[in-house]
Amino acid sequence: MLIFRLYGSLLLACGALGMPIALQRTVAYLGLTPSRAGTAAIAGLGIAVGSLGLACAASAAFAGAIARFLDHPTATELWRAFMLLTYAQAFATMVSFIQLARGRVSESVAVTVGAYGLAPLFCVVVFPNMSLPAVIGWTAVLAAAATAPSLVQIFGWAIAHGVHDVRREAQVLLRYGMPRVPASALEPALDLVLPWMAIVSGAGLAGAGYLAIGLALMRPLNPISGALSQVLLPESATAVARQEFEVHATRIRQIAEWALHAGLFMTFQMVVWVDLLIRLWLGPDFAPAAGVAAIVCLSLAPSFLYACLRGLIDGETERAVNTVNLCIAVLVFVAFAGLSGWLRILGVASLGVAYLASRLTLASMTLRYLSRAHGLSLLALKPWRAIASTALLGAGGVVLRELLPERYLLVGMVAFLPFAALLFLIVMTRSAVEWIRSLRRLLWVTP
């Protein structure tokens, strides 16, 4: 199921022709002209329905061959069910993005929760004895039903303001979305290919599993960065459309500073406690994965920085900046992995180093663009203060581990992490970083 889900995400990235992100950005950017925004919403949904529908139908037609290729020949019906679910949930995502671009946050959340949360939960609870393909098929039906109210609302809004020149808006959407298709595919592919390369290089399933564990430990941060990106993309597009360039630049500086500092704190703590987390999650048999997983987890800070800033960049420009940067990062990954394989150094850990190098490249390319576009320098983000404080807190975690008996490590980690986070906030407050001032204004604002 996980394998099919991952490959289904790649199909969505290519088959949707970049419409999810194009719809979100274009509808927000054209918000001052509701007739154009509504027309763009209808045109984008029409393009995505056709292109993704053809991709999913073709994939379902060759379900048997695909299942055999993925070494699951008995799962043909499961693949077809996943294609239906991929189609329904992709459509729900685009409707949710349009609502978010219109400022209808509650409706956007309702669609996402209904299609991705309540629909599968309802089917699993109500039909516990039904076959897995049937459960997934009914989940797709319920996901479509959860999307219907917002879809009707969007069509009513578009028709009320008049639908004109659909061809022009379709061209605008395709001009923005098509160059971003490679980025939509490359980002999940970079994570997918890492364990696969371990198998190809001779490290076997165990080596691939070590790398996959490291990637999985970073995955809980995806909802934070993903939600932030989805909110900031339309905000960025709206600010640029209204020519609020100073507000936009300030927002970029604050988000970049916060993402860098928070990412460094989480990276140090993750590396200190990674072996304990693995033992708690998977048991002592997987303890040997800690070293390789720790190398992969060093990528947390640059990955988090990029993930938090990509929406701001996509929202402000039609240029496919993130696509170019991701392509360069993938080339760096391939070069490092190939070189380490040729030299036969570090074993499976070399792939973790290659992944870290690619993520550092991606973060540095992102900051390079922001430096050119907005004059944002790395030194302006005060990285050395954050590195010093997070390194000291990480060293504190190491000392605590050395002092505590083995049976008290879990209690020590649970007690230490909130204390370390609070101490980190105090240090950053005394350092007068900009994101702390913004956070205090947000929390203590008076009505």
Image (cartoon, rainbow, N blue to C red):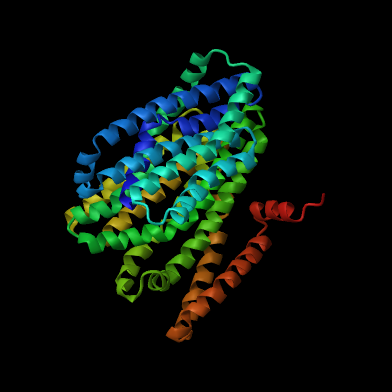
Q: Residue furthest top?
A: 165
Residue at image point 26% right, 33% down:
61
Q: Locate residue 83, reporting x and y percent.
A: 35, 39
Q: Is residue 447 left or right of residue 308?
A: right
Does residue 386 sit above or below 55 in this rendering? below
Q: Locate residue 309, reporting x and y percent.
A: 52, 43
Residue at image point 42% right, 61% down:
217
Query: Taking the image as drawn, is residue 190 in sight?
Result: no
- Quarter-of-image position of residue 180: top left
Q: Is residue 182 left or right of residue 63?
A: right
Q: Is residue 239 left or right of residue 200?
A: right
Residue 190 vs residue 280, the one in the foreground: 280
Q: Locate residue 215, reporting x and y percent.
A: 38, 57
Query: Taking the image as drawn, is residue 405 in sight?
Result: yes
Residue at image point 49% right, 25% down:
44
Residue 131 vs residue 17, the one in the foreground: 131
Q: Locate residue 299, reporting x and y percent.
A: 41, 56
